[in-house]
Amino acid sequence: MSPIPSAALSEHIQPAATAPELLRNFCIIAHIDHGKSTLADRMLQQTGVVSDRAMRAQYLDRMDIERERGITIKSQAVRMPWAVEAGGTTTAYALNMIDTPGHVDFTYEVSRSLAACEGAVLLVDAAQGIEAQTLANLYLAMENDLAIIPVLNKIDLPAAQPEKYAEELAGLVGVDPADVLKVSGKTGVGVTELLDRIVERVPAPQGSADAPARAMIFDSVYDTYRGVVTYVRVVDGHLSPREKIVMMSTRAHHELLEIGVISPEPIPTKGLGVGEVGYLITGVKDVRQSKVGDTVTNQSKPASEALAEYHDPRPMVFSGLYPIDGSDYPVLRDALDRLKLNDAALVYEPETSVALGFGFRVGFLGLLHLEIVRERLEREFDLDLISTAPNVVYEVTLEDRSVVTVTNPSEFPGGKIGEVREPVVKATILAPSEFIGAVMELCQSRRGDLLGMDYLSAERVEMRYTLPLAEIVFDFFDQLKSKTRGYASLDYEPAGEAAADLVKVDILLQGEQVDAFSAIVHKDKAYAYGVMMAGKLKELIPRQQFEVPIQAAVGARVIARETVRAMRKDVLAKCYGGDITRKRKLLEKQKEGKKRMKTIGRVDVPQEAFIAALSTESGGKDAKDKSKK
């Protein structure tokens, strides 16, 4: 086996020379931190598309944040040549690989990648075995009828148990344990055999070369100089440079300025044929004109029917994003517009807050997604942001049968409420069997119902729960990890809605409601939330010239109270003698002044206090320490 020489590479990537039967489209799917990006690095080296001198770790992870955290956030497509010798003849194949993210929050990226492939490499860490996200990705691949190639990675680790986990993986996929490939992305062992297995097992793409062109947009990125770069998978026909194309859902017409493949840097070609994966540049600057899931066709000979679209992802968590400096609002709006192109799962709409000013209500797929988006906005667009506590969408039915959708606690209606429905999810938890009691205790404290439990092996158990999404989005995963010493893994999917006894807890400062601190919680936890928030704010709000009451209330009933004591000034300091009436007169004057100040004075909550109060316990402590400095 050998990579195609670089001299032949330019000929190899011309679509006219690449027949569909010589193409193999596949992706790598796995749990987070199981070595996808490292294995992709070795493939790039083995196929010769990246020289040893140009090579760097996590080559396909383009963002700084991906490299720092060691996670993949954006799927990356790359084309690699691979020659296979059989019966004395050498056949040159073109392998289109898509490296996908592993975290549950980026499953949408994985689902789009699967739609552009015929096969999937299912990667499992030989030291950790199958985890919850492995199962989720496997079911996704099976739904798309992909050829599954089971692979055990990291066999070079001292803690690796390849034989044990090969049996577990073989039982899951339905193959013989001997068919499970054992590789090491770090040392390169077994990578050549894996590339040969991909050529052998992954079917060639199917499509009609004579039909009108149809290409599916599976991703797109924004380039400052070239505009929107669209990644497509051609299903039928042929796309050539300088021809006119039409986006079938928006009916927008463009001219193809450049077309090519990524290998792993963009290489312009004479066009793309059936089954090929590549990029298009039309010079369009408007991010909304290149919709992920749309079908591209020729203007002169358009297709009559579009390809099946992706399902738009449903945001699972909502949070408000506000610029600390109000004048940055237009910058934040443009930044979200641009980020929306790179991240099709992002949903946002403008909103205003009495305390925080103008900002956006943003929908995310999960807490890591929220964290990554916020960090990207701050880094790439130089913004300073405050994010409010994450919450989910509720359906509130009033007594007059009207239904209100609540994405923000400030929208929660007053008056008599008939029913409140909250989203629930089906959660799959994989953990060592010794932690069953700890996991059950945690799930029950979060209003979970056990659906079932299966032993994957003597040491590992799979537990299935129905849980309210609101109980998961805050710190459930952190708690799960700490209770199982980091061994448990979690995956969840939407499972409809359920009625629950929920109330809105308002936080009042000096009788005025602060909407940013309001929360919708279960009735049993309202008191605990009110006490916690009042205590937190008492420490964070600086002392004023007058006493400031902090109250937590459900409707008109106050359930918790703390008081920020007033700063005292000794007005009697200059009275070193004389009649008591003089002292009394000064004290009365001070009392009147304090009373007047209390009625007209406003409590200024510093930004640090907002950040601290809206973050989790440890984050609040950090911000408090920062504000003290």
Image: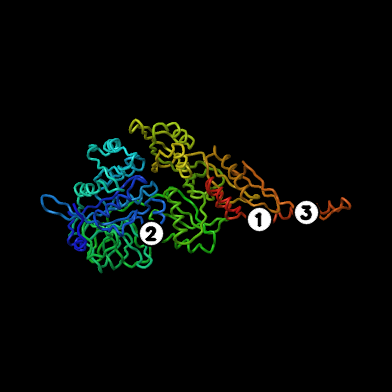
Mark nearer the N terminus (1 vs 3): 3
Residue beneath label 3, please?
Answer: 590
Nearer to us: label 1 or label 3: 3
Q: Residue at x 51, y 39 (%)?
A: 501
Q: Residue at x 54, y 61 (%)?
A: 325
User: Could you say which is closer to the camera, residue 35 or residue 380?
Assistant: 35
Quadrant of the drawing holding the C terminus: bottom right
Task: Left or right? Give the position of 535 relative to 429.
Answer: right
| First-in-chain label (3 vs 2) | 2
User: SS at mark 2?
Assistant: helix
Q: For the residues marked 3 and 2, what is the alpha-carbon distance in whole angstroms?
A: 60 Å
Residue 215 image position (x, y, % from top left):
26, 58
Question: Which label is found at residue 258?
Answer: none
Which residue in the protein does label 1 denote? 602
Kindly identify the amino acid type of the residue bearing the numbered disc 3: Gln
Disc 2 residue type?
A: Leu
Where residue 22 sits: x, y (%)? Answer: 18, 54
Q: Position of residue 260 (x, y in %)?
A: 26, 63
Secondary structure type for disc 1:
loop
